[in-house]
Amino acid sequence: MNPLARRSHSSDRPGPSGLAGRSGRPGRSGSVLVRQRYACAYEEGPRPIPPTPPALRLARPVLAPATVRACAITQEPVLALTYDDGPDPATTIPVLDALARRHVRATFFVLAEQVLAHPGVLRRIVTDGHEVALHGFDHTRLTTLPFAQAIGSIRRARDIVEEVAQHRVRLFRPAYGAQTPQLAVATRALGLDVVLWSAWARDWTDEPTQVLLDRAIGAAHPGGIMLLHDASVGVSGYRGRGAVGEPGAGALPGAGALPGAGVEPGAGGEPGAGGATGVGGEPGASRVLPTFDRGALTGGLIDELRSRGYRFPTVSGLAQLAPVGRMVWFERAPA
């Protein structure tokens, strides 16, 4: 038996009738190119599905290699919960406990360095039936590294995570969402699909649990991918370079020159782009570690949204329910 045999991580309840294919790739539903102004309305909540502009349809063959998965295109009440920066026993376990009590599966974008430090927590993630995805080796902004070093880091990190998890890793979310067109194409060539988000709680900030919960509930929308964190690596500046603030601080990202579109609204990424300067000159950055209850945030979010009819597939499961919303997303080169 292949030691990296795949398993389904798709259903929001354990059982054989999962929603996702086993590859982590979009299923029969296909994909649709969307503009950043749709996917990047991170706190807008439910939103009308816009038609795909003709320019995007025509440019799809050229743009496709540089696109990322951002959401699903549907009005069905489904939402994928995703967690970055773990595993960390102090903060990941409460999240796992909250998910287990509610029979919900999520997608965990893990850091290989954290996996090496806490392999047992990753094994718990796998045992509980969650989807394991890659966030990198550490929280370094890959666009600050030479191309070969960045790709080598991704490959090394994937190998580590697969070895510990004993499952294939098919999804990747770069730290801060930062990538160049060249990194986007090379990452796809490695067999990794880049996944970003379309809603968030801004849980890298030190705010009361209820404030974060209200924001996350308001941000949720049908077909959304919710950005959450089960650790504070990116917030604390862990390993330093590029890891202060969370995520996308600074120049992130430029939409490039979409035909007829220019640089679209919402291209400032996460968080507070264009706003006040934080630590290290990055907008929204902070060295204050969050102290909120991550388990309570997860549990409260599921309970409220479930009362509104929401289901919670993994990212791969979401792709089996509706077309994947993809957008062009990369960081401008410094002027």
Image (cartoon, rainbow, N blue to C red):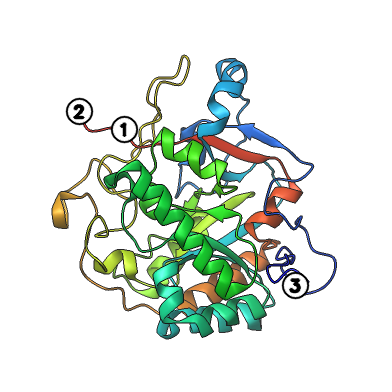
* Residue corresponding to mark 2: 335
The part of the image, by quadrant, that contains residue 79 is bottom right
Give me the C-alpha separation between circle 1 and circle 2: 8 Å
Classed neighbour count for the residue bearing mark 3: other residues with Cα under 10 Å, few (<14), some (14–19), many (≥20): some
The image shows residue 332 at horizontal and vertical percentages of 31, 32
Earlier sequence position, callout 2 versus callout 3: 3
The image shows residue 68 at horizontal and vertical percentages of 53, 41
Give SS at disc 3: loop
Mark nearest the camera among 2 and 3 is: 2
Give me the C-alpha separation between circle 1 and circle 3: 41 Å
Earlier sequence position, callout 1 versus callout 3: 3
The image shows residue 258 at horizontal and vertical percentages of 46, 21
Instruction: Check if mark 1's residue and mark 2's residue have beta carbons within 8 Å.
Output: yes
Q: Is residue 269 visible?
A: no
Task: Out of 263 and 48, give the one closest to the viewer.
Answer: 263
The amino acid pointed to by label 2 is Ala
Classify the position of the N terminus by image quarter. bottom right
> Which numbered tag is attached to residue 332?
1
Classed neighbour count for the residue bearing mark 2: other residues with Cα under 10 Å, few (<14), some (14–19), many (≥20): few
* Residue corresponding to mark 3: 13
Q: How many marks?
A: 3
Q: Is residue 324 visible?
A: yes
Give me the C-alpha separation between circle 2 and circle 3: 49 Å
Classify the position of the C terminus by image quarter. top left
